Structure formats: structure tokens, C-alpha cells
Image (cartoon, rainbow, N blue to C red):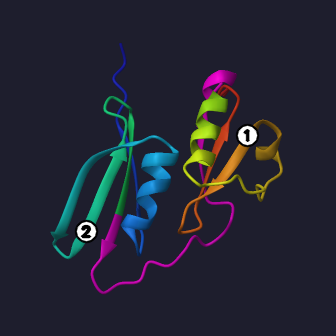
Amino acid sequence: MTAFPTLRVARPTDDIDALLPFYRDGLGLDVLYRFADHDGFDGIILGGKDAPYHFEFTTAHGHAAGCAPTQDNLLIFYLPNVVNWHAAVERMVSAGFPAVPAFNAYWDRQGRTFEDPDGYRVVIQNAAWNT
């Protein structure tokens, strides 16, 4: 059995609490850890308890992070099961995050794109990942 590393995607934000409903309530991620004033940074780590990935959002005291540089900064979740895909899309909408048109129309064919409060986007794709 091959052991795969855990992937952590980390990025700054100006408002962790504004992002929390999007990633926790909309995407259904768990708050795994939260910290305050760790060498001048506040942060939160979200993910699934046994998921091979985590998302870390940090705020540096006295530093403005700003918003996403483009509408094509994406995280993509591939959900091949249509029932699971519909449930994930409905959870986002029910949490108050309507789908937005994708910058690249490819993602609208089998997926839905959602934009977080910082302007970064998440695609929920109804397809299997094929290399």
C-alpha cells in the first residue's frame, strides 16, 4: 500500500470569520484547528477528519491580504456520484452561496462554481478524475 501525503492548501485572508460559513456550512468541512496570535498570525484549518487534504486560512496582523487575483483561481472537487454531487450543490445553495458562472465555460458543463467572500472559487464537478 502506498502512503500518500496529506495536502494542505494555505492562503491568506483579511477575514477568517467571513470565510468560515462558506467552507464549513457550504462545503461541509470540519474545523480541525484554530489558533490566535501565533507569531502574529491568526488561523483556521478545515478539512475532513480522515481526508487527505486540509485548507488553512491565515490573517497576518497588520497586513492586508486582498482578494483573489482572477476568477480562474479554483479548487475543484470531483464527485462522480450524481446523488452526492446534487447534495453538495444543494448544501452550498442552502448555506446562502448561489452558483456563479465559471470564468472557463468548461466547468459549467458538468459542474457548479461557487465564490467565497475573498473571490476565490470552488468548483463542484460531477465527474470522475481521469488522468
> Is 123 left, or right, of 2 in this rendering?
right
Judging depth in this view, the residue of 85 and 56 nearest the camera is 85
Residue at numbered disc 1:
111
The answer to which of marks 2 and 1 sits earlier in the sequence is 2
Looking at the picture, does residue 35 appear above or below residue 5?
Answer: below
* Residue in the image at 61% along x and 73% along y: 69
Q: Which residues are magenta?
A: 58-84
Label 1 CA crowd tier, 10 Å (few <14, some 14–19, many 20+): many
Q: Nearer the viewer, residue 111 or 128?
A: 111
Q: Residue 114 in the image: x percent, y percent?
A: 64, 53
Q: CA distance from mark 2 to mark 1?
A: 33 Å
- Residue 64 drawn in magenta: yes
Q: Residue furthest bottom?
A: 62
Q: Amino acid at mark 2?
A: Asp
- Residue in the picture at 76% in, 45% down: 107
Can you give x and y, in whole percent of width and height, for residue 33 in the image? 24, 50
Q: Residue 123 appears at what percent x and percent y?
A: 65, 46
Give the quarter of the image for residue 91.
top right
Dot 2 alpha-carbon crowd within 10 angstroms: few under 14, some 14 to 19, many 20 or more = some
* Magenta highlight on residue 68: yes
